[in-house]
Image (cartoon, rainbow, N blue to C red):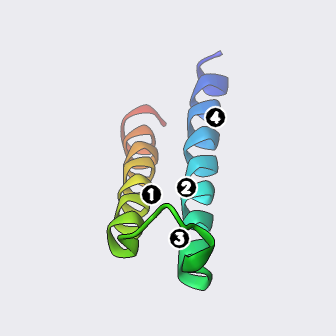
Amino acid sequence: MKDRLIQALVENARGNIAKHKLNVEVFLNNPSGVAEHSDYVETIQKELDMISHYEDQIEVIEKHFL
């Protein structure tokens, strides 16, 4: 059970990383496609912060629970 929970947590974090990376790619390749965002740099920084958050989660799991 423990292994499955850890696996689910890591997979969830990786999925969120993929989602936020894709958001950055969309902003970089087509910033006009997201009209409600006027500050593109701030928007991309928020996505990068989320990537860092989930990478940190994976690091903590690997360091303390594997």
For the residues labelled 1 and 4, say whether their Cβ atoms are less than 8 Å apart: no
Q: Nearer the viewer, residue 58 or 33?
A: 33
For the residues labelled 2 and 1, say whether their Cβ atoms are less than 8 Å apart: yes
Q: Earlier in the sequence, mark 4 or mark 3?
A: 4
- Distance from disc 2 to disc 1, alpha carbons, whole Å, reads 5 Å
For the residues labelled 3 and 2, say whether their Cβ atoms are less than 8 Å apart: no
Where does label 2 land, which residue? 17
Circle 1 or circle 3, nearest the eye: 3
Quadrant of the rendering where the N terminus is positioned: top right
The relative height of residue 44 versus residue 17 in the rendered view (above or below) is: below
Where does label 3 land, which residue? 24
Give the numbered dot on residue 18: none
Circle 3 or circle 2, nearest the eye: 3
Q: Nearer the viewer, residue 19 or 40?
A: 40
Determine whether the residue tagged by mark 1 lies in a helix, strand or loop.
helix
Q: Earlier in the sequence, mark 2 or mark 1?
A: 2
Q: Nearer the viewer, residue 16 or 28?
A: 28
Where does label 1 land, which residue? 51
Residue 13 sits in which quadrant? Answer: top right
Circle 2 or circle 4, nearest the eye: 2
For the residues labelled 1 and 3, say whether their Cβ atoms are less than 8 Å apart: yes
Circle 4 or circle 3, nearest the eye: 3
Image coordinates of residue 55 in percent, x first then y, are 43, 54
What is the three-letter code of the residue carrying label 3? Val
Residue 6 sits in which quadrant? Answer: top right
| Mark 1 Cα-neighbour bin, 10 Å: few <14, some 14–19, many ≥20 | many
What is the three-letter code of the residue carrying label 4? Gln
Residue pushed farthest top?
A: 1
Determine whether the residue tagged by mark 3 lies in a helix, strand or loop.
helix
Which residue is depicted at the point 54% across and 74% down? 27
Where does label 4 land, which residue? 7
Image coordinates of residue 25 in percent, x first then y, are 59, 75
